[in-house]
């Protein structure tokens, strides 16, 4: 029997193994979700909201478990306490706007006609969730899908397969029926087969560009809605008028937190030439204070990368950049084992001929380049196949908005980064994919419009 094997990045040991569900069993699970959907949608929205938030609260009762299991599964230090803050904020916001977001759009209600647009549940939603922020990325779709009346099947990444199990356990304990929300262990072939069979009405995938292409290929000709959030190479830009201390603190944390394994982490930084030397000096000093080590140690500030193969990408990009003339500023940490434990690194003398400035790194490595002016910065920031977020550091709100209008990205931040605001649409462009998560648009993405033209008399 094929198994999914979870290797802990802490020491390379096998943390968990799970048998892969057969195609027949997977088809049965999807059929059960389909059969349960109409009854679930028939429940009052208040009841659905209450049950979803009860599931969220159950997770909140076990935050120590969350932090420990995240450290064991993907290496995030326990000092950061897990993900419940963002998990709860996102679910709570989506619950708070649900009635308004899902209310009919009334066009006319007169003596002659009633015209309106209703929003109906999508049906069955498949969530294929990533390992890097496994609770928060899952809840982005899980909460609004369930609240809007769809049933959900969650397929979590093997690296964090215990997260899917924890979520299902909590939501079932809170009263959400098992056929309404089911966690599964499937392989890629089974996932593709079910998508091709139109087992789902919406597929929400967060992961690699290659994975997104596989999802779209499986759905080809089925007219199944596929929403994707894929790779990123998010830039930061420090203008001449910026608070450099704040920019260093924000951008370097955005580049290095979670060992750089953030969808919207900062992967390249452009600094106005008049502030460049100051920025680099302070950025290097900050990174040198980091403590690399066992994530179960509360003194550790940066843990191992989630998998040795992810670390290999970082080292390969670093090696190429150095061979092409880049300068590394951080001496190798003694805890760097050449495997999952990676020294956080800052590079200068980088160019866009280097992969480190154009290809996704997804690790604790960032290049910093000087720029002449805003036009130069925009040119470089747009010179990338990805488009998720951009972080602008300036005192000028109007300038930031004007720059944002020129940038090929899904979100524009000013004086912050690496954050997901549940009131705003989470989306991307170019090879980052297409989709609309959270906000009122998140409900629109998980429902279908139905128009009514009711002529009276």
Image: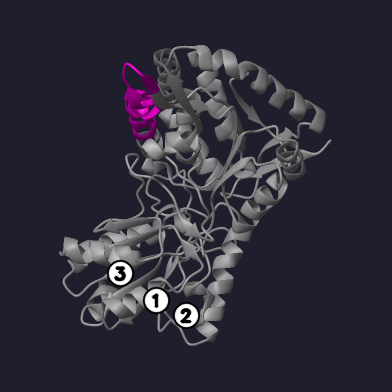
Q: Residue at x 62, y 34 (%)?
A: 201
Residue 258 highlighted magenta (yes or no): no
Name the outermost residue toward the front: 457
The numbered mark, 3 or 2, whose residue comes first in the sequence reads: 3
Q: Write the start and end of the magenta stretch as one range.
A: 88-114
C-alpha separation, residue under disc 3 versus residue under disc 2: 15 Å
Q: Nearer the viewer, residue 132 or 226?
A: 226
Residue marked by disc 3? 237
**Which residue is at 71% across, 36% downward?**
17
Q: Earlier in the sequence, mark 1 or mark 3?
A: 3
Q: CA distance from mark 1 to mark 2?
A: 8 Å
- Between marks 1 and 3 in the image, the one whose residue lies nearer the viewer: 1
Marker count (numbered): 3
Disc 1: which residue: 380
List x then y, in percent, for residue 6: 66, 42
The answer to whether residue 176 shows anywhere in this view is no
The percent coordinates of residue 287 (x first, y second) are 35, 65
Image position of 311 with respect to 347: above or below = above
- Residue on which disc 2 sits: 352
Dots 1, 2 in contact, CB < 8 A: yes
Residue in the image at 22% along x and 78% along y:
275
């Amino acid at each position: 029997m094929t198994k999914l094997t979870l290797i802990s990045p802490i020491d390379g040991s096998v943390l968990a193994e799970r048998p892969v569900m057969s195609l027949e069993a997977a088809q049965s699970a999807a059929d059960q979700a389909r059969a349960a959907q109409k009854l679930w949608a028939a429940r009052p929205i208040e009841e659905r909201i209450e049950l979803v938030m009860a599931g969220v609260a159950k997770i909140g009762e076990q935050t120590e478990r969350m932090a420990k299991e995240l450290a064991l599964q993907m290496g995030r230090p326990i000092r950061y306490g897990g993900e419940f803050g963002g998990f709860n904020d996102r679910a709570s916001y989506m619950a708070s706007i649900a009635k308004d977001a899902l209310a009919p759009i009334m066009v006319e209600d007169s003596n002659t006609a009633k015209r309106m647009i209703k929003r109906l549940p999508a049906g069955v939603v498949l969530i294929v969730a990533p390992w890097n922020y496994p609770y928060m990325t899952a809840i982005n779709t899980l909460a609004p899908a369930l609240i809007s009346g769809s049933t959900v099947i969650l397929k979590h990444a093997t690296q964090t397969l215990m997260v899917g199990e924890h979520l299902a356990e909590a939501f079932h304990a809170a009263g959400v029926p098992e056929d309404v929300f089911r966690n599964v262990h499937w392989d890629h072939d089974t996932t593709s087969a079910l998508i091709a069979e139109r087992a789902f009405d919406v597929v929400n995938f967060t992961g690699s560009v290659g994975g997104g292409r596989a999802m779209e290929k499986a759905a080809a000709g089925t007219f199944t809605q596929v929403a994707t959030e894929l790779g990123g190479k998010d830039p930061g830009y420090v203008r001449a008028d910026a608070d450099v201390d704040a920019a260093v603190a924000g951008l370097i944390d955005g580049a290095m937190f979670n060992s750089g394994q953030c969808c919207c982490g900062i992967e390249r930084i452009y600094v106005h030439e008049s502030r460049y030397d100051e920025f680099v000096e302070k950025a290097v000093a900050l990174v040198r204070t980091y403590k690399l080590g066992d994530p179960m140690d509360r003194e550790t500030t940066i843990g191992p990368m989630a998998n040795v193969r992810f670390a290999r990408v970082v080292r390969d990009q670093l090696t190429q950049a150095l061979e092409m003339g880049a300068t590394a500023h951080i001496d190798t940490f003694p805890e760097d084992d050449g495997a999952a434990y990676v020294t956080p690194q800052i590079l200068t003398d980088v160019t866009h001929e280097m992969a480190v400035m154009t290809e996704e790194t997804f690790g604790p490595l960032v290049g910093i380049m000087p720029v002449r002016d805003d036009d130069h910065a925009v040119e470089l920031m747009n010179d990338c196949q990805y488009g998720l977020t951009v972080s602008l550091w300036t005192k000028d709100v109007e300038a930031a908005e004007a720059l944002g209008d020129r940038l090929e990205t899904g979100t524009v931040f000013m004086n912050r980064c690496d954050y997901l605001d549940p009131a705003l649409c989470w989306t991307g462009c170019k090879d980052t994919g297409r989709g609309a998560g959270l906000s009122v648009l998140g409900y629109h993405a998980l429902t279908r419009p139905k128009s009514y033209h009711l002529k009276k008399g």
